[in-house]
Image: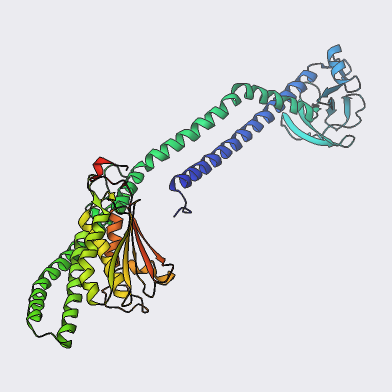
Amino acid sequence: MNGSPSVLNRLIWRVGGIVACAAALAAGFVIFGFQARVDDLRDRSLRTQAEDVARYISAENNGDLRLDLPPSHKDFYLNSAVQFTYFGSVEQFIFAVVNARGSLLFSSFGRELPLAPVDAASLQEVHYFSFLRRKDRRRYFGASLRVDDFAEPVWVQVAHGPATTSFVVDSMLEEAALKWVWWVVPFAAVLIGVVYVTIRNGLRPLLEASRYAEKIGPEHMETRLPDAGMPREVLPLIGAVNSGLDRLERGFEVQRAFTTDAAHQLRTPLAILKTRLSTMERNEQTEALANDVRRVGRLVSQLLNIAQFDNLTIADDESADLREISLEVVTMLAPFALEQGKSMEVEGFEGPVWVRGNADALIHAVRNLAENALEYTPRGTPVVVEVLEHGAVKVKDYGPGIAPQHRELVFQRFWRADQRCGNGSGLGLAIVARTLEAHSGRVEIDDAPDGGTVMSVHLENQFRGNASHPSANAHP
């Protein structure tokens, strides 16, 4: 589950991707609009430049045209196509005046041909063009302005290289940067923060529902997922889960009621059967019947324990003495062990070992471990119950042991390993596991050093010391 993708992270990434795509699209539109603006400014500049040159063209009495540029314009256009240095590049501003026949009338220094061909039949006032200059392989942008103020039309053509356009672009970029760029980073950070907080708040009901779901278990079958404040899209899922939990609770209650009723109904006939067997003459057959009745009685008792412990909850002030519990279990099972030629022993810490727990439930758990050990330990060997001061009980037998691959399975109800064919029902260790789960403890299975199995019960929140009651010397 730890490797599963987070819904929050997934939404953040997707929303972030959408925002990034939107930003890129917006940037594309801005760049497109910016370029269009640059082109428009360049065209307007070229037209103004051509109109400025056309202003100084006049006709003489014989009809010839004359160009009288003022000194400033001569320096700009005619002085060897005056060069301007911009970031290390060389920029030239050039012009030409062409008649309807395509003949060059006036031009910048060194020009022998028009900057662009003219179409005498076209009435278009301004025509924009570009060309690649062979000398320096640089692209020039120009405008051709038709002038009809004379006997025949002439075209004033002006052009400049890319450095002028770059100057315009950089000027616009600098202006935009001064106005807008300074708040882009803070705006992006605020936007990401708003998106994160918004999505997290939107998922808060789901996180709350998951916390409720973690509480659902056999001891809290009444818990349901809340639907208050849930997104409309999630409500069908919440309803389906709660309906499933309702059906599961009803089935669980029916099963528990059936188990409890059946066990209670069986106790009376078993007690009657046991009484009748005790009045009969003891022989091999009656002993076998007595053993069968004892096993059935144990199964009925375990079924009742399962029904009882499925709802087991431990109060904060409940306490139990593991030493006393162990002594009670050994005293209870010692006669049965002697009948089978076996024995029961208590070892370990001799003082009270107080733990937080239900005494009756822990007695049943330790008793099931001891009965399971008696089932498999050979005749003439003991079952040792050892009490540890730190809040643990170990039950050791000298039986065949439990294979490592079966140590998790033995706590399942009615599970039995083929190699451990005894007379048990397969419920004892399931009761132990459920009891320890209710106590927030654990049960472990290990191999005994000299053969057999050691089953250990470990409980948390111990009360250590030899005090007569946990309140006298409690160390939670």
The quadrant in which the N terminus is found is bottom left
Q: Residue at x 76, y 21 (%)?
A: 49
Q: Position of residue 37 (x, y in %)?
A: 65, 29
The x, y position of residue 109, in whole percent, is: 91, 24
| In-front residue for pair 3/321 | 321
* Total numbered labels: 0
- The C terminus - image quarter: top left
Relative vertical location of residue 393 with respect to residue 191 in this rendering, above or below: below
Q: Is 424 left or right of 294, judged from the image as shown?
A: right
Q: In the image, residue 290 lies at what x, y percent?
A: 16, 80
**Image quadrant where residue 350 sits:** bottom left
Identify which residue, 125 or 160, lies in the foreground. Answer: 160
Residue 47: quadrant of the picture: top right
- In this picture, is 338 found above or below 129? below
The image's colour scheme reads rainbow
Foreground: 276 or 155? 276
Q: Picture quarter containing residue 73?
A: top right
Query: Residue at 63% across / 21% down in the picture?
Result: 178
Whether residue 263 is visible, yes or no, is: yes
Q: Describe residue 326's horizontal placement relative to residue 38 as left or right.
A: left
The answer to whether any part of residue 246 appears in the image is no
Residue 415: percent from left, percent from top:
32, 72
Which residue of the protein is positioned furthest toward the top in this rendering?
71
Q: Is residue 121 left or right of residue 62?
A: left
Towards the viewer: 348 or 286: 348
